[in-house]
Amino acid sequence: MAALLFKLRGVPEDEARDIRQLLSENDIEYYETSAGNWGISLPAIWVRHSDDLERGRALIDNYQEKRALHARQVYEEDIRREGEKTFLHALKKQPLRILLYIAVILTVLYLSTMPFVSLTAD
């Protein structure tokens, strides 16, 4: 009997591709379900035989541990190379863009609150 192995909602395409490849390399029969036309169904990978469920989960858990470790190493390397990215860093790098964003935000806030402020002024 088929069993749910891995939910694909919110999973990056490269990770899903790697998991498909991992299952194929280890001779685990699987099939996929999509989110459907309206996106309300469950996109997932299912194993055809429930006997493969534990082995498949162990493979995926191992893969995700390695993926998380690699992502952490890349992040730490970026921090070492460029330093932490803060608001001040972005302001120094692209001051006009940041000031434009702030101006747009303040304009939206002003236009959103002005009707209520004018009601209390009468």
Image: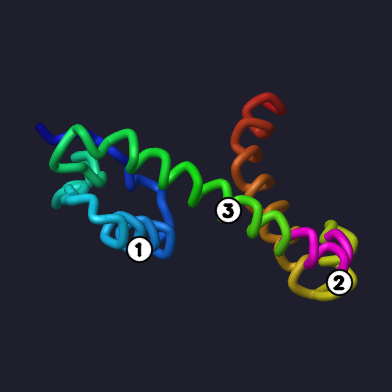
Check disc 1 and report its element: helix, strand or loop: helix
Give the amino acid type for the residue marked by disc 1 in the picture: Arg
Check disc 2 and report its element: helix, strand or loop: helix
- The mark that comes first in sequence, 3 or 2, is 3
Question: For the point 90% across and 71% down, which residue is it?
Answer: 92
Q: CA distance from mark 1 to mark 2?
A: 30 Å
**79 in the magenta segment:** yes
Give the amino acid type for the residue marked by disc 2 in the picture: Arg
Question: For the point 80% across and 75% down, which residue is it?
Answer: 94
Q: Is residue 48 left or right of residue 61?
A: left
**61 in the magenta segment:** no
Give the amino acid type for the residue marked by disc 3 in the picture: Lys
- Please state, as top left, top right, bottom left or bottom right, where the C terminus lies in the image: top right
- In this view, the residue in front, 37 or 96, is 37
Q: Residue 31's spot in the image, x, y percent?
A: 16, 51
Q: Which residues are magenta?
A: 75-84
Q: CA distance from mark 1 to mark 3?
A: 15 Å
